[in-house]
Image (cartoon, helix red, strand yellow):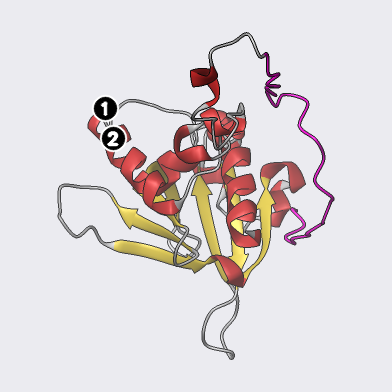
């Protein structure tokens, strides 16, 4: 069982040991033209990143742009989990607690609306939405390492031994206060992809 909570901490800014520093010393023998237009900003390693932002820090519109480029490279190519692939849509298997059915689909992490949406795969321009999970409604997340008895009866039997590594179940509340919590059982491609997704969900929720 993953402890679903966020914490924030403040720390004083520290000097970056990787920052490049430039010292300009004047020499009366040097041509004065060298100092006519001094640089207004001293370049640093941090500023060498696109847009002057640190590596790994990307805004949602940029992620969408990169996701579109990633889709053009071929959706059928297996890829490891990245935040960009979560925006574009990652293939998964949806397991039905009620019917025991396995449904091929894809999930999308919508950072702007804070939702995890699972939709059917296919050629339709408007694929069917199979499940919506508001990230702020998540109460807990279970993985197979927590014990197979944490999952609804019959779910584990739907999987091969290899697929169990990618299994996780999100427990979240619904809009109806009188209704029971909902269970979303998904299978990612691997254990590492599953873990990276769950870490990403926590980061998005806590940001």
Q: Mark 2 points at which residue?
A: 69
Q: Name the secondary structure under disc 2.
A: helix
Q: Is 138 left, or right, of 60 in this rendering?
A: right
Task: Please identify the quarter of the rendering in which residue 164 is found.
Answer: top right
Task: Report the span colored magenta.
Answer: 1-27
Q: Is 173 above or below relative to 112?
A: below
Q: Is 199 above or below relative to 21?
A: below
Q: Residues within 10 Å of mark 2 (few under 14, many from 20)?
A: few
Query: In this view, which residue lies farthest toward the top?
Result: 29
Q: Mark 1 points at which residue?
A: 73
Q: Is 13 above or below relative to 109?
A: above
Task: Please identify the quarter of the rendering in which residue 25 is found.
Answer: top right
Which-is-in-front pick, marks 2 and 1?
Answer: 2
Prevailing secondary structure of the magenta residues: loop
Q: Which residue is drawn at 82% across and 57% down?
A: 9
Do the CB atoms of the residues marked 2 and 1 lie less than 8 Å apart? yes
Percent across and percent down for residue 149 are: 72, 53
Residue 103 makes an appearance in the image: no
């Amino acid at each position: 069982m993953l402890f679903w909570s966020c914490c924030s901490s403040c720390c004083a800014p520290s000097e970056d040991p990787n920052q490049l520093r430039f010292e300009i010393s004047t020499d009366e023998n040097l041509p004065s033209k060298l100092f006519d237009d001094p640089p207004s900003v001293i370049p640093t390693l941090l500023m060498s990143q696109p847009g002057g932002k640190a590596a790994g820090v990307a805004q949602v519109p940029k992620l969408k742009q990169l996701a579109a480029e990633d889709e053009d490279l071929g959706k059928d190519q297996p890829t490891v989990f990245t935040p960009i692939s979560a925006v574009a849509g990652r293939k998964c298997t949806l397991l039905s607690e009620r019917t025991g059915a396995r449904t091929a689909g894809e999930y999308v992490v919508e950072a702007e609306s804070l939702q995890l949406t699972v939709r059917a795969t296919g050629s339709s321009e408007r694929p069917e939405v199979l499940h919506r999970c508001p990230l702020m409604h998540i109460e807990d997340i279970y993985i197979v390492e927590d014990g197979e008895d944490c999952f609804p009866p019959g779910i584990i039997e739907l999987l091969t031994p290899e697929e169990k590594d990618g299994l996780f179940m999100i427990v979240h509340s619904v809009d109806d206060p009188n209704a029971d919590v909902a269970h979303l059982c998904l299978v990612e491609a691997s254990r590492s992809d599953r873990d990276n997704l769950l870490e990403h969900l926590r980061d998005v929720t806590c940001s």
